Image: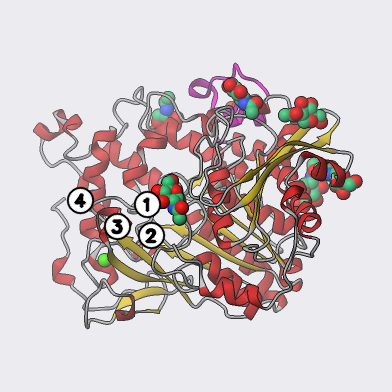
Amino acid sequence: MRSSHLVSSLAAALPIATAAPEHCSKDFFASILPENATLLFAESVAENGTFNVSPANIAYPKSPTNLPASCALQINVTSSATSAFSFGLFLPDPKTYNDRILGVGNGGFAGGVNWLDMAAGLHYGFASWSTDTGHNSTSGDLSWALKNEERRQDWGHRAIHGSAVMARQVAEAYYKAEAKYAYFSGCSTGGRQAIREVQLHPETFDGVLAGAPAWWTDRLQTWSLWVGLLNLPTNSSSRIPPEAFPMIAKEVMAQCDWQDGLKDGIISDSAGCRFVPEALLCSSSNELRNQTAAECLTPHQLDTLKQIYGDYRGADNAFIFPGLELGSEEQWAFLMGSAKPSTYGSEFVQDFVLDDPSWDPTTSYNSTIPFTASSLRPGNASATDFDLSPFHARGGKIIHHHGSADGLIPTGSSVYFHSQVQQTLQPRGVELDDFYRFFVVPGMQHCAGTPADVAAPWYFAGPNQAANLGTSAYSTPGFSDAKHDELLALMAWVEKGEAPETLIATEWKDQDVKNGVLRQRPLCKWPEQARFLREGSPDEAKNWKCEGVHGDHQPGYAQEEQVVKSY
Ligand SMILES: *[C@@H]1O[C@H](CO)[C@@H](O)[C@H](O)[C@H]1NC(C)=O
Ligand SMILES: *[C@@H]1O[C@H](CO)[C@@H](O)[C@H](O)[C@H]1NC(C)=O
Ligand SMILES: *[C@@H]1O[C@H](CO)[C@@H](O)[C@H](O)[C@H]1NC(C)=O
Ligand SMILES: *[C@@H]1O[C@H](CO)[C@@H](O)[C@H](O)[C@H]1NC(C)=O
Ligand SMILES: *[C@@H]1O[C@H](CO)[C@@H](O)[C@H](O)[C@H]1NC(C)=O
Ligand SMILES: *[C@@H]1O[C@H](CO)[C@@H](O)[C@H](O)[C@H]1NC(C)=O
Ligand SMILES: *[C@@H]1O[C@H](CO)[C@@H](O)[C@H](O)[C@H]1NC(C)=O
Ligand SMILES: [Ca+2]
């Protein structure tokens, strides 16, 4: 893959950094580290080489391949009397260094250095880093947090900040040159990490990519538990068996696809779809008896379905968290398909909120728990400071996106965040458009991917996406420019003032780059939606434009194609 013209033209204008190769050594790093930090290892990676990730890194065991020549190292940092985090750092050869730092984020509660995502950054020429967030675990194991507020603080914000600051200092000492810009790219927990750092330390990053941010930890995790409990097998009469999810997805597609103005198998305006769930009701006693055949829903199951799509509310109708989006059904089994609710919810309450591993969610959960979590704010992780004006004032830029088919983190939680920031800043005369843009990605699942039969364009080199293309991928193959690559779009905005009006997402035939492009389509800045111009191929981005707002139907479009079963 060739490196981007934008990156090389930007880099050409900057002074050339120097570092002797022997600097990739224990002695050199030991000589520059502060007292609270120790070097775990430093090793050279040859041109086109592989960095062999230690099998002890159970969160991110995959080794990146075909790397640019670089120095790989890991540094351990003391964060309190009883806690420490570490971070990994790839320092590219001075010849390919772009004078910029990139941090990449984590997923779920994973404790490990994310070398694979760092590698994508290294290919552009960034000095790229990632932190283990202060513990060692896979994504769904939260037991490390039990009665350990120091570790929760590391995971919540401290490890990201400490790593960002120290990674920059180490890179500047290594190249004997100041870094020109610092960026961060994260999805899910990584999206939260991006926003939380912007809130707590607006000076750290010049720009961030925040994908599907798990920003409201206290509510997201308790909602995950609630929605899991709602659909346990023990709730026999109201449970929707996972075998029925595809049937629901099909009905949602039948009703919502055409409503965006084009029946193309992609729901471009899920927020604007008027969906009639009663179309799924069983219509005969025979079907009722045969409900596990997953052909229709009973009235009790229909109630469950409405709760899944609806806002989660507590006593006195108090808002807790938004529900899942129409079109997200293919990913529902993750939170609602098992005999037990996911550990993302149950262990969060046990290990972060109540400090009681014996607490039984199936017998003891109630809807005051989300509010308890919010008042305790374990780890100070929730990114609820909506006043982003300090970041705006320092010239920072945020590109935020969320897939509309995300079945793990409701798309509506991103809409809610954007709206809260707007309500906070607009009355003070701060225009969001100047520094913060939000893009919904129709048909994209959690951070990456699309249901096979939907084949929505979802790839734009966003956080975590390159790893889906292989262990040596980065940017958008064949389209390495600021329209098709979200990271280059962020750089163009920060460094040249070229704000992204649209991004273009790509999908390859059979989801494989080797087969060539299947379709490309613009992603629109919220609240606009993409409309087909009704000329040429809908698979070419130029035949679309962004206009109107979500939920703003074009009257007369394809009404005759509506499929609503009798009910
Ligand atoms: C890079 O390494 C791969 C094996 O991983 C090899 O097939 C390829 O030829 C190498 N490319 C160069 C330019 O050395
Ligand atoms: C993380 O914990 C696992 C056991 O769950 C262990 O095998 C591994 O060596 C540990 N990794 C590190 C980096 O400590
Ligand atoms: C990191 O430093 C802490 C002390 O702050 C220490 O307890 C821990 O063992 C160190 N980790 C490694 C992997 O050396
Ligand atoms: C480590 O020490 C440096 C230098 O004293 C300090 O700036 C930094 O905040 C410390 N990092 C952490 C995580 O405490
Ligand atoms: C069953 O469903 C009800 C509401 O439909 C819900 O309140 C409850 O948490 C669910 N789980 C169990 C185990 O009863
Ligand atoms: C809700 O659950 C918590 C934790 O188990 C418990 O302390 C509290 O009393 C419960 N509240 C209600 C209203 O049942
Ligand atoms: C949590 O962070 C906020 C800023 O968002 C800060 O004002 C507050 O003091 C912190 N609370 C704790 C317990 O660290
Ligand atoms: Ca459509």
Residue identified by numbered label 3? 514
Report the magenta residues as a range.
Answer: 347-367
* Side of 54 relative to 240 (left or right): right
- At mark 3, the secondary structure is helix
* Mark 1 residue crowding within 10 angstroms, few (<14) / some (14–19) / many (20+): many
- At mark 2, the secondary structure is loop
- Which circle's residue, 1 or 4, is located before the other in the chain? 4
Residue identified by numbered label 2? 458
Magenta stretch holds residue 247: no
Task: In the rendered view, tell whether residue 116 sits above or below residue 169.
Answer: above
Q: Are marks 4 and 3 in contact (CB under 8 Å)?
A: no
- At mark 1, the secondary structure is loop
* Side of 149 relative to 372 (left or right): right
Task: In the rendered view, tell whether residue 283 sits above or below residue 143.
Answer: below
Residue 40 picture location, percent across and down = 73, 34
Between circles 1 and 4, the one closer to the viewer is 1
Residue 67 picture location, percent across and down = 53, 51
The amino acid on which the numbered mark 1 sits, given as a three-letter code, is Gly
Residue identified by numbered label 4? 279
Q: Are marks 1 and 3 in contact (CB under 8 Å)?
A: no
Q: Are marks 2 and 1 in contact (CB under 8 Å)?
A: yes
* Side of 397 relative to 335 (left or right): right
Between 2 and 221, the one lying in front of the other is 2
- Which circle's residue, 1 or 3, is located before the other in the chain? 1
Between 265 and 498, the one lying in front of the other is 498
- Residue at the location (32% across, 31% down)? 239
